[in-house]
Image: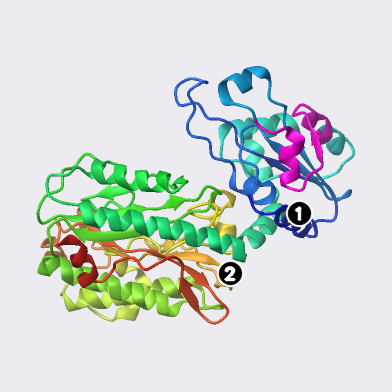
Amino acid sequence: MFSVETYEQRRSALTTRFEDGLLLFLGNNESPMNYVDNPFPFRQDSTFLYYFGLSQPELAAIIDVDEGRATIFVDELTIDHIVWMGDLPSVAERARLAGVEDTRPRAALDEVVAAATAAGRPVHFLPPYRADTTLELSDLLGFPPGATTERASLELIRAVVDQRAVKTDEEIAQLEEAANTSVDMHTAAMRMARPGLKESDIAAEVERIAVTAGGRLSFPVIATVHGEILHNHFYGNTLADGDLFLLDTGAETAMGYAGDLSSTFPVSPTFSARQRTIYEIQLASQRAAVETLAPGVPNRDVHFAAARIIAEGMKDLGLMRGDTDEALAVGAHAMFFPAGVGHMIGLDVHDMEALGEIHVGYEGQARSTQFGLKSLRLARELEPGFVITVEPGVYFVPQLMDLWRSQEHCAEFLDFDELDKWRDFGGLRNEEVYLITTDGARRLGKAKPMTVDEVEALRS
């Protein structure tokens, strides 16, 4: 945990955004895999972690705006818990680590919320993303489970997004730690990949490194010879000469801060001429995106800086044609770049996505419905303290080629006959994490091998 003062200051800053009422935070509970006593690994709700720092199941908390007091609701451990789980400090001792003096049994939460609603006081809560949280909110506040998301407090969502979006120095240190471990994971994978290995061998090794570092994975590993499938969690393929291997993985620190990096490298000792050509286009697109990063610059512009390089590269190969600006405007480049350039990262790998990307990435403004651009999670102006990923990619998706050909979609900008010659190429991306500073941006974590020479040096 951070210092007591950190959590007190965070709650104090949040409270100033409200005139009255209760701010309600439900922590996560255990989630059974196949029966109650065999749960998935526990992960606390990130916003609960942010304001209270405690990572254990069955916690709830309230900040009473009128009284300026925080309360944590949780039951003391019974001897049955202690026999199976070991002893823990008392509820009061744990709460004091977060600067909270008022602790009560979990059942008292019902009474506090009921009294507030009876008095006509607002009870602000965030949209739930777990079924048990949805049901608990329904019971506490007396409305149907299906209404919980629409009744979530827009005022609280905006206040939390504004606060969590700007990372403090101590958070940046955690994100540096996550990035450094993530680089170790990727470097190890580059060294070990060889024909005959399974994708699962590499997936297992990078998870081992994350756990050995004292944390765990920040999201399920993507480790695949089919890089054209953007989120591919199948690990059953065997690596072969001539394959490109795409690894997208990151470590989460013990305090819950996420890393997220991507790498693409040949299974053979060197890139083929064709692989090198596309790889260099992707690297150039990433450099263009990074050079665009600065306070006040909309991340949408960062996205299009990368897209422009990809489109120009495809024109040089004869796969695209026509005016680049016109092609970008209608989304022709999304044939090769159907994803967004990056996203916020922090306590969540897609930071605060549960609060709604329209608030996190768009400040409530309308989001594009255009294919490719609609996948851009972060479009708003960048601010000092934002931490974001930069991950443009180049993908050749046969099914997308066939669909657009059948529809004659963007046919004035795409040569489908030439595209057919690339159906079996796959896809690639590289990804790094950047902190927006007062005058630009800096990479978090140590350098990951990225250039062709750097990657091939590890492959030899």
User: Is residue 103 inside the magenta stretch?
Assistant: yes
**Residue 110, image x and y in percent?**
78, 30
Residue linked to disc 1: 8
Label placed on residue 107: none
In this image, 438 relative to 25: left or right? left
Residue linked to disc 2: 385
Residue 148 visible in the snapshot: yes
- Label 1 sits on a secondary structure element that is helix
**Residue 68, image x and y in percent?**
86, 51
Instruction: Locate residue 242: give its quadrant.
Output: bottom left
Q: Is residue 273 above or below residue 113?
A: below
Which of labels 1 and 2 is toward the front? 1
In-front residue for pair 383/414: 383
In this image, 16 relative to 446: left or right? right
- Label 2 sits on a secondary structure element that is loop
User: Is residue 293 inside the magenta stretch?
Assistant: no
